Amino acid sequence: MYRALAFITALILLLCAGSMVWGEEQQTGIIVTGSADVQGQPDVAYVTLGVNTQDKIAATAAQANAAATDKVITAIIHVGIPKTDIRTSSYSIGTMTDYRSNPPVITGYQASNEVQVTIHDLAKIGPVIDAAVAAGANVANGVNFGIENDTELRQRALVLAIKSAQAKAQTMAEVLGVKLGPVLSATEAGGVTPPRPVMYGMAKAEAAPTPIMPGQLTVNASVTVVYIIIR
């Protein structure tokens, strides 16, 4: 009876030890991160333009702003931008305060209306800005570029990132004197890095059109891969 009990106890300990070793082997791995950049040509631009008006009476400031903004939008449409590509991005009416007085004194009201213009024909960026400024736009937040369908670029960057991770893992395995096993896990990240927004002043448009250069967009992919080690 004692021998049988001792044998069963030893067998249980052996199985537990084997399970622990197997678990440790499963958790042993090489963790690498691969990244890649792919550049693409922008095919859409987002221009933010607006009108800022001031008056001692809030209603007057709002009415003047509405009339001026309507002229700006009409001018943009005349360049060839459809109404569906023009949307209000912000609107506000606030007080103007003279803080030099004690106590501070409200000196008037300021109305601000900004619209975002989506431009699919990049050759129209300059004419849109010039037309808006000539019509009375006095607020600008620059030009941002994008790629409407960047799926192909993202996939290309992801493939290159995975290959980079594989090469790193293989190098590490060779130096460490081990072999790579199957992939335990893979995590993907990435995004689009646009060129710096183009800023422009609000001086009255001259005869020469405003030059705008879109540059290149960079699509980045990053992959973290865990490989099991085979000893």
Image (cartoon, rainbow, N blue to C red):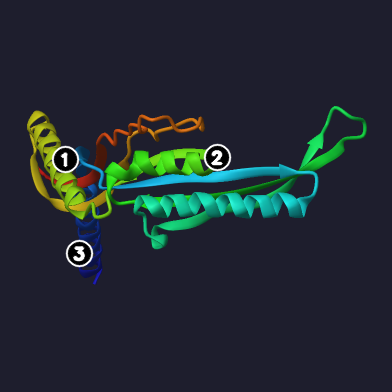
Q: Give the residue pinned by disc 2.
A: 139
Q: Residue at x 25, y 41 (%)?
A: 220
Instruction: Say which of 166 and 70 sits in front.
Output: 70
Q: Position of residue 172 (x, y in %)?
A: 13, 33
* Quarter occupied by the N terminus: bottom left
Q: Is residue 50 above or below residue 8?
A: above
Q: Residue 167 vs residue 19: left or right?
A: left
Residue highlighted by disc 1: 165
| Residue 91 in view of the camera | no
Residue at 53% across, 42% down: 137
**Numbered disc 3: secondary structure:** helix
Taking the view exactly as shown, the residue that stands out farthest to the bottom is 1
- Secondary structure category for the residue under label 1: helix
Kindly identify the amino acid type of the residue bearing the numbered disc 3.
Phe
Quick one: label 3, few (<14), some, or many (20+) residues within 10 Å?
few
Tell me the kind of residue under disc 1: Ala
Q: Which mark is residue 10?
A: none
Of badges 1 and 3, the one in the foreground is 1
* Residue holding disc 3: 7
Give the quarter of the image for residue 176. Answer: top left
Give the distance between the C-alpha atoms of the residues marked 3 and 2, in whole angstroms.
87 Å
Front disc: 3 or 2: 2
* 181 shown above or below 96: below
- Of the numbered discs 1 and 3, the one sitting upstream in the chain is 3
Q: Quadrant of the C terminus?
A: top left
Q: In the rendering, at what x and y percent does residue 198 appear?
A: 39, 33
Q: Amino acid at mark 2?
A: Val
Labels 2 and 1: the sequence-earlier one: 2
Which residue extends farthest front?
A: 207
